[in-house]
């Protein structure tokens, strides 16, 4: 139990909009958080659901997707450990804008609307951070609109890689490492192209030395990638 509390506390401290809470408030908040496990490919909630909860990823990774009538997934966003989602539905009381699915075994902290209203909305520092999160969501949506407007599959893939580098990039001497493991199918669902197209184009980028595939399977974007990506 103690290890679990320490793990929850360490993640809570990494969440930007909770950074304004005092130590006592964080400890009090931990008492009302629900820790739930979702197996790989388990649906966390559906697009048409009206949500009364906000979710914080303790460990694991999830994808927010729109599923077309023919069952094809289009990834709208990816979230990993320390990220949150579901806050928009709590604020406006409307249905969730996407279906969220666990991409791997995932542990999630769940905040009810009651807890959200009582602990967070009354704190001005927290409110400012929530506004920042919503602005970031809006900017990401603009980029995804740009992705969908591009006619060339290569440009779509480049833009998705650049977006992922902004969201999950870690800089080192080699370039910017996208610090989230993705399959070629994940990138294809994000860019709305075929998996075969992604595989073929990533191989070309490796050959042209614009990206490196590291031993850990992370993708590293080198400086040449950015020079050739005017998006």
Image (cartoon, rainbow, N blue to C red):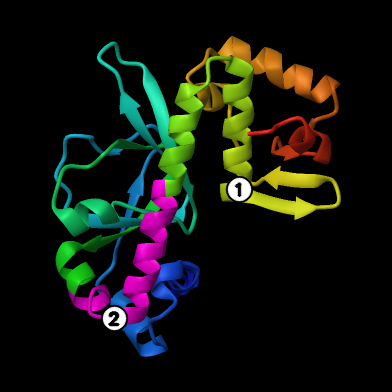
Picture coordinates of residue 161, whole percent (x, y): 62, 34
Disc 1 element? helix
The residue under the point 28% across, 51% down is 86
Which residues lie in the magenta part? 118-138
Front-most of residues 227 and 58: 227
Q: Quick one: label 1, few (<14), some, or many (20+) residues within 10 Å?
A: some
**The label number, if any, that marks residue 123 in the structure image:** 2
Looking at the image, is 198 positioned above or below residue 26? above
Q: Which residue is mark 1?
A: 166
The residue under the point 37% across, 79% down is 125
Q: Is residue 215 visible?
A: no
Q: Quick one: label 2, few (<14), some, or many (20+) residues within 10 Å?
A: some
Q: Is residue 80 visible?
A: yes
Front-most of residues 54 and 3: 54
Picture coordinates of residue 214, whole percent (x, y): 78, 37
Looking at the image, is 117 positioned above or below residue 51? below
Question: Going by the image, does 205 lie left or right of 167?
Answer: right
Disc 2 element? loop
Question: Going by the image, does 210 lie left or right of 13?
Answer: right
The Cα atoms of the two marked residues, 2 and 1, are separated by 29 Å
Magenta run includes residue 101: no
Front-most of residues 213 and 174: 174
Question: Going by the image, does 49 lie left or right of 185?
Answer: left
Picture coordinates of residue 138, whole percent (x, y): 39, 48
């Amino acid at each position: 139990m103690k290890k679990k509390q320490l793990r929850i506390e360490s993640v809570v401290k990494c969440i930007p909009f909770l950074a304004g809470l005092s130590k006592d408030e964080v400890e009090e908040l931990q008492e009302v958080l629900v820790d739930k496990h979702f197996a790989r490919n388990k649906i966390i909630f559906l697009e048409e659901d009206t949500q009364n909860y906000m979710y914080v990823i303790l460990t694991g990774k999830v994808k927010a997707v729109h599923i077309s009538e023919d069952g094809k997934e289009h990834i709208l966003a990816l979230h990993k450990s320390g990220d949150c989602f579901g806050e928009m539905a709590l604020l406006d009381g409307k249905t969730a804008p996407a279906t969220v699915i666990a991409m791997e075994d995932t542990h999630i902290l769940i905040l009810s609307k009651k807890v959200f209203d009582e602990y967070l909305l009354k704190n001005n520092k927290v409110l400012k951070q929530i506004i920042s999160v919503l602005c970031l969501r809006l900017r990401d949506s603009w980029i995804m609109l740009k992705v969908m407007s591009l006619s060339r599959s290569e440009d779509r893939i480049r833009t998705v890689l650049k977006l992922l580098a902004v969201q999950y990039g870690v800089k080192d001497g080699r370039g910017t490492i996208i610090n989230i493991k993705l399959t070629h199918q994940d990138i294809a669902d994000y860019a709305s192209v075929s998996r075969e197209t992604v595989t073929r184009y990533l191989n070309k980028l490796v050959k042209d030395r614009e990206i490196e595939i590291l031993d850990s399977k992370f993708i590293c974007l080198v400086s040449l990638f950015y020079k050739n990506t005017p998006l």
